[in-house]
Image: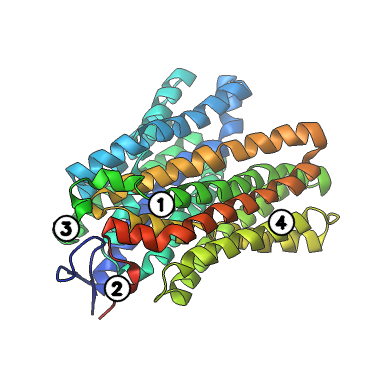
Amino acid sequence: MAFHHAAVGDSADVSTSVPRTFAWVVFALTFGLLISDYMSRQVLNAVFPLLKVEWALSDAQLGMLSSIVSVMVGVLTIPLSLLADRWGRIKSLVLMAMFWSLATLGCAIAESFNQMFVARFLVGAGEAAYGSVGIAVVLSVFPKHMRASLSGAFMAGTMFGSVLGMALGGIIAAHLGWRSAFASMAVFGLCLAVLYPIVVREGRIGAQQKVSTASAKRPLATLFASRSVICAYVGNGLQLFIVGSVLAWFPSYLNRYYHMNTDKAGMLSALIVLIGGGGMILCGILSDRLCRNAPDRKISLAITYCLISGFLLATAFRLPPGIGQLTLVCLGMLVASGTCGPAGAMVANLTHPSVHATAFAVLALANNILGLAPGPLVTGMLADALALDHAFQIIPLMAIASALVFWYGKRHYHRDIGKSGLPDTATAGVA
């Protein structure tokens, strides 16, 4: 059975046909490489104590080894995504995976802090554009009405990969040493990178087709051409301010107010991360199922996710420590990342298909600049001034700002779709 769908921005008589099984193989391999990406990125955190002792490193130096990857991702994600849109996404993905895997292998053989820093620098350069290019490839082989589900599921891979990287890295390091932990992540990535181009070829996912709309003349302009797409970037970034804050500080919260040891606090926090990742998938699927014939309802659902998560988390952190509080935190985090699916669908619908990798790079940059980077910092500042429990009572209020941005985008969505010349997802179908 094949998926039949008109690509966004294509004229009505232009369509692509991709076998259902092959489409899911593309998703599985691309998702697997995303897991490898974040395993290679986060394995470092699991071996911090071993590196600190062996090389007599300061906490600041350990922090530099971690942050340099994020810095390189922030600097290079847009230019490398744009290059991939022009040069070829499949070739770019394979090259990226090879690059970060070999750099991770370099981490395994590093003999000093300086060598490890250079290796981590290269890991960041290799991983910079993978997420944005990967989701563009995935969306190109599935019907448009599945975009929220696929965006949410794909982005959830970042959380799953992070947990696996830290958990497996810690286990391997404990039994075989920290060098084996890095080497294992590298081998996993290299194996997938070799398999990927054998199975997934540019020709099999369909060549990018010419578009008979005004947007084809200046595809890059569609990245910021509408109020709705800007609202998708900003609204999702603001919502992830809450997610980033809770994920970064929840282990400390458990340590201070539940008196948990770091191992128990880490395990419970990892569970919260997995719940958040599962929520991305479930909320994306729900968005597609409920809004198949009315895509603007996805934005309404994103607003609902914002308000529900904000209410649950604000209520939770006003309760005394206990099972009731933890239950509400879990429920709040289940829907807190739910905006990722609808936001991803909005970005794909409102931008030209030839620059989808670049569009998702802009979304990723907004997620980091507006949410994941400042969230933990602001929470720490509030904790210094008010105590961490009071800071957690304030942070969920950001959901109101996110909801207002999505609401503004919803008001202009249909008008922006009409002006862009890109058909709405309601026209998509599956054979």
In primary-sequence order, the first of circles 1 and 2 is: 1
Q: Which mark is residue 229?
A: 1
Question: In the rendered structure, which amino acid carries the disc numbered 2?
Answer: Ala
Q: Is label 3 in contact with label 4 (beta carbons under 8 Å)?
A: no
**What residue is disc 2 on?**
428
**Picture disc at residue 211:** 3
Residues packed near mark 2 inside 10 Å, few (<14), some (14 to 19) or many (20 plus): some
Tag 3 secondary structure: loop
* Marks 4 and 2, the one that precedes in the sequence: 4
> Where's the N terminus, which quadrant?
bottom left
Residue 389 on image: x %, y %: 80, 45
Give the amino acid type for the residue marked by disc 3 in the picture: Val
Residue 121, relative to residue 324: is it above or below?
A: above
Q: Residues within 10 Å of mark 4 (few under 14, many from 20)?
A: many
Of mark 3 and mark 1, the one earlier in the sequence is: 3
Name which residue type carries label 1: Val
Q: Residues within 10 Å of mark 3 (few under 14, many from 20)?
A: many
Question: What is the spatial separation of the Cα atoms under label 1 and label 2, in whole angstroms?
Answer: 20 Å
Q: Secondary structure at mark 4?
A: helix
Q: Is residue 109 in sight in this rendering?
A: no
Secondary structure beneath disc 1?
Answer: helix
Please give left or right for residue 205 compared with residue 232 in the image: left
Q: Is residue 277 visible?
A: yes
Mark nearer the N terminus (3 vs 4) = 3
- Residue at 34% across, 68% down: 425
Q: CA distance from mark 4 to mark 2?
A: 36 Å
Q: Nearer the viewer, residue 197 or 238?
A: 238
Q: Position of residue 188 (x, y in %)?
A: 36, 48
